[in-house]
Amino acid sequence: AQKVTQAQTEISVVEKEDVTLDCVYETRDTTYYLFWYKQPPSGELVFLIRRNSFDEQNEISGRYSWNFQKSTSSFNFTITASQVVDSAVYFCALSEENTGFQKLVFGTGTRLLVSP
Amino acid sequence: ETGVTQSPTHLIKTRGQQVTLRCSSQSGHNTVSWYQQALGQGPQFIFQYYREEENGRGNFPPRFSGLQFPNYSSELNVNALELDDSALYLCASSTRGSPLHFGNGTRLTVT
């Protein structure tokens, strides 16, 4: 069975600090996708990144970076020089690709609070 | 490009009633998925529709049902509402192989 664990319930940082959100996943499949979504107070889930299981290259997009390590089943997300606008709940998710449809399994989320 | 829109934004219903939630998919997207997000939890997959057919379902009872229309918009229907159905219901649209794009959700409260 698939499972995503986000052990950090809430993280508080001061603006300009770097912060890393942890994500550990479980799956028996060899082909899968990993995602990060951001959920601001408005409720909408905002897509940030998708990674397939064959691509372990780290990715950087502006202040965001992602570290995918299959050996430890982790897909961690780092925000560099955090800003108040980064305050939100962040979800890591996993989907398998052999079911014929796209079903995301989400973690319980990490609430990030960035104070000025 | 118009994103995913959901209506209504908020809804209050009484236990035992029925409710219909609506979703307009993003332009160019032909697949719609519905998720239930209880307070403090991650979203849980309800079902997915592709070309007006349900092609995947999560662990939800049959009183959760849906429709997809020729214009790819969708409805989620829940019968015999229970208190535990209180949640944020999120609709997402996509094309085959693309990431899901979510709407703002409908907050359902069952009293």
Image: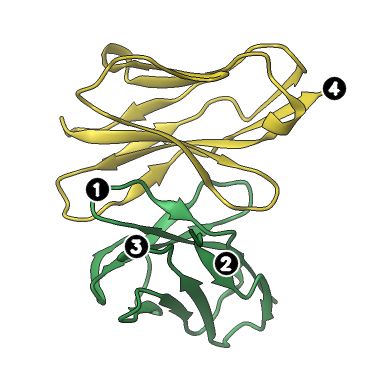
Residue B50 in the figure: left or right of residue B11 = left
Give the mark, 3 or 1, whose residue is nearer the N terminus. 3
Residue A98 in the image: state x and y as whole percent.
Answer: 14, 46
- Residue at image location 50% in from the left, 62% down from the top: B4
Q: Residue at x 43, y 62 (%)?
A: B26
Q: Could you give the CA–CA distance between mark 2 and mark 4, rounded to whole angstroms?
A: 37 Å
- Residue A56 versus residue B23 in the image, above or below: above
The residue indicated by pointer 4 is A116
Could you tell me how far apart the alpha carbons at marks 3 and 2 are, in whole angstroms? Answer: 34 Å
Can you tell which chain is drawn yellow? A
Q: Report the Cα–Cα distance between label 3 and label 4.
A: 40 Å
Looking at the image, is mark 3 or mark 2 earlier in the sequence?
Answer: 3
Residue kind at label 1, given as amino acid type: Gly
In this view, the mark in front (1 or 2):
1
- Amino acid found under the numbered disc labelled 3: Gly
- Disc 3 marks which residue? B28
Q: State which chain disc 2 sits on.
A: B
Are tags 3 and 2 found on a single chain? yes
Chain letter for the residue marked with disc 4 in the picture: A
Q: Are marks 3 and 4 in contact (CB under 8 Å)?
A: no
Query: Circle 3 — which element?
Result: loop
Q: Which residue is mark 2?
A: B84
Q: Are marks 3 and 1 in contact (CB under 8 Å)?
A: no
**Front: mark 3 or 4:** 3
